[in-house]
Image: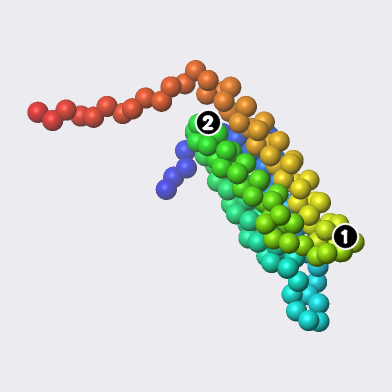
Amino acid sequence: MIIDKERIRFGFTDIFSVLISVLYLIGIRVWFPVCEPMESGFMSCHWAGEMLKGISILLVIMSVVHLLIPDDRIKIGTDITLCAVYVLTFCVPGMIIDLCKMSEMNCRSHTAVLTAVFMVVMMLSAIADIILYASHSNGKKHKRPEMEKKV
């Protein structure tokens, strides 16, 4: 498929969304991962970390797709979907999946806090993106294609 370069439109918020998603993906794996396994096995925070790793890959894919979509209305719909994923991601560590009991453990002191920070920043970026694209597509109305009349 040939990509029509004139139809691809993206702005600062689109690029920022991709960059922050990639940073979160790297961060959850390298900079602020959950606790290491104990000798007795995995703690509950391990499963929160696994879920966050999977969601972070989804966030990168969705952000790249959002970047490549040319239509403003579809970008708004993608932003709304991303906001739902941000809320889900925010709720994973500690609410959906329990973390370690001690507050000084890495999962509580780093992973949960930085996940919340990243999700708030991403949510604000998505809201700014919705406002931006809503103002661009304000006067545009969707027109249904007319069907050919068979004679």
> Residue 85: x percent and y percent?
61, 47
Q: Give the mark, 2 or 1, whose residue is nearer the N terminus.
A: 2
Disc number lying in front (2 or 1): 1
Residue beneath label 2, please? 72
Residue in view at x 55 percent, y 40 percent = 78
Residue at far bottom of view:
39
Residue 22 appears in view: no
Position of residue 91 in the picture relative to residue 134 (left or right): right
Q: Give whichever of 114, 2 is nearer the camera.
A: 114
Is residue 82 depicted above or below 134 in this figure? below
Is residue 49 depicted above or below 86 in this figure? below
Instruction: Tell me the CA gap for discs 2 and 1.
Output: 44 Å
Position of residue 106 in the picture relative to residue 141 (left or right): right
Q: Quadrant of residue 132?
A: top right
Tell me which amino acid carries mark 2. Asp
Residue at far top of view:
139
Q: Quadrant of residue 53?
A: bottom right
Residue 135 appears in view: yes
Residue at far left of view:
151
Q: Please rate how many residues cluster around mark 2, counting C-alpha atoms within 10 Å: few if below 14, some from 14 to 19, many from 20.
A: many
Indicate the secondary structure of the residue bearing disc 2: helix
Residue in view at x 65 percent, y 61 percent = 51
Residue at far right of view:
104
Q: Give whichever of 120, 40 is nearer the camera.
A: 40
> Residue 25: x percent and y percent?
70, 56
Residue in view at x 74 percent, y 41 percent = 120
Indicate the secondary structure of the residue bearing disc 1: loop
Residue beneath label 1, please? 103
Tell me which amino acid carries mark 1. Ser
Task: Give the quarter of the figure containing the C terminus.
Answer: top left
